[in-house]
Amino acid sequence: MATDTRLYLFTSGSTRTEMQFLTLNQGHGEPVSPPLPFYVVTHPEGNVLIDGGNPLAVAEDKRAYWGEIVDLFDPVMSPEDHVVAQLEATGIDPESIRYVVQTHLHIDHTGAIGHFPNAKFIIQRRELDYARSPLYIDAGVYLPADIAKTGEVDWLFLDGYDDDGYDVHGDGVIRLLFTPGHAPGHTSVLVSLPETGEVLLAIDAAYTMAHFEQMALPGVVNSGVDLARSVARLRRVADRGGALVVPGHDPTTRETLKHAPEYYG
Ligand SMILES: [Zn+2]
């Protein structure tokens, strides 16, 4: 198993939906199938999982777990697409995961919760607080069955801008950027690799490169003002370090990126 620093990109299946849910106020009725990514950074001081795609229950009986949400966001996922199965298939021992970065708690990012008992889960405190009692505009994107499991998790809490740039191993390899807007406690991730250089995982601050390029907002917005500021901030970070930018749910960009078992070193 790899002990050097590598970034692996995985996809936990996809979602059949309509364009207006990917990009705000655009493409009503137009079908689109965005991917559901998660990421692993292998590191000599402990491996890090960033999100976990969909929960396993979605692959088993999506309507039983998600209910009517599947009429708007129809997940296409088999049990082999779950995070634990994919790590095992790639030769990454799930027990080697020391940290899980939970970038936010939307339903398509919660696949690691309830797994990885050896890991500390890192999250913005305000994200967990909000997920437990969201406003009606966000009620559909936080699943009570997922949030019920968060009581069992060993959390490491971050407090917004006070902890901005949190360095997971203390060596500059993985830094967590507070980027609220899509969700109140949303985190983006800057990974610094020995050969590739900087990779900016925008996560859902930018579903697509059009969102990163400030041409539109994602279809799910908690605060448009916060989100626009977060994207402006991510663009400065990417410019400064010449980062490779990875958007959160881009059906086209992801075809140009390396996927596990390939990796960025
Ligand atoms: Zn999201």
Image: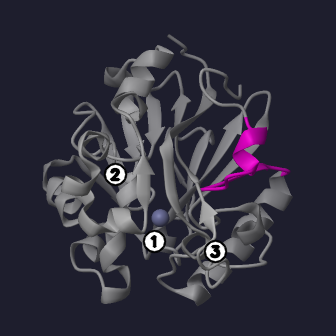
Residue under the point 69% across and 40% down: 192
**Residue 244: in magenta span:** yes
Quadrant where the C terminus sits is: top right
Crowding near the residue tagged with mark 1, few <14, some 14–19, many ≥20 C-alpha atoms within 10 Å: many
Crowding near the residue tagged with mark 3, few <14, some 14–19, many ≥20 C-alpha atoms within 10 Å: many
Indicate the quadrant where residue 136 lies.
bottom left
Residue 158 % position (x, y): 39, 62
Residue 102 % position (x, y): 40, 53
Q: Toward the viewer: 218 or 166?
A: 218
Q: Amino acid at mark 3?
A: Thr
Label 1 secondary element: helix
Point out which mark residue 92 bears.
none
Side of 3 relative to 172 (left or right): left
Relative vertical location of residue 140 with respect to residue 107 in this rendering, above or below: below
Q: Amino acid at mark 2?
A: Thr
Label 2 secondary element: loop
Q: Can you name the residue that lies furthest to the top here?
A: 1
Q: Are marks 3 and 1 in contact (CB under 8 Å)?
A: no
Q: Which residue is mark 1?
A: 160
Q: Are marks 2 and 1 in contact (CB under 8 Å)?
A: no
Residue under the point 30% across and 78% down: 139
Residue 240 % position (x, y): 84, 58
Q: Is residue 158 visible?
A: no
Q: Is residue 234 visible?
A: yes
Q: Which residue is mark 2?
A: 110
Relative vertical location of residue 252 with respect to residue 71 in this rendering, above or below: above
Nearer the camera: disc 2 or disc 1? 2
Stretch in magenta: 242-257
Point out which mark residue 23 bears.
3
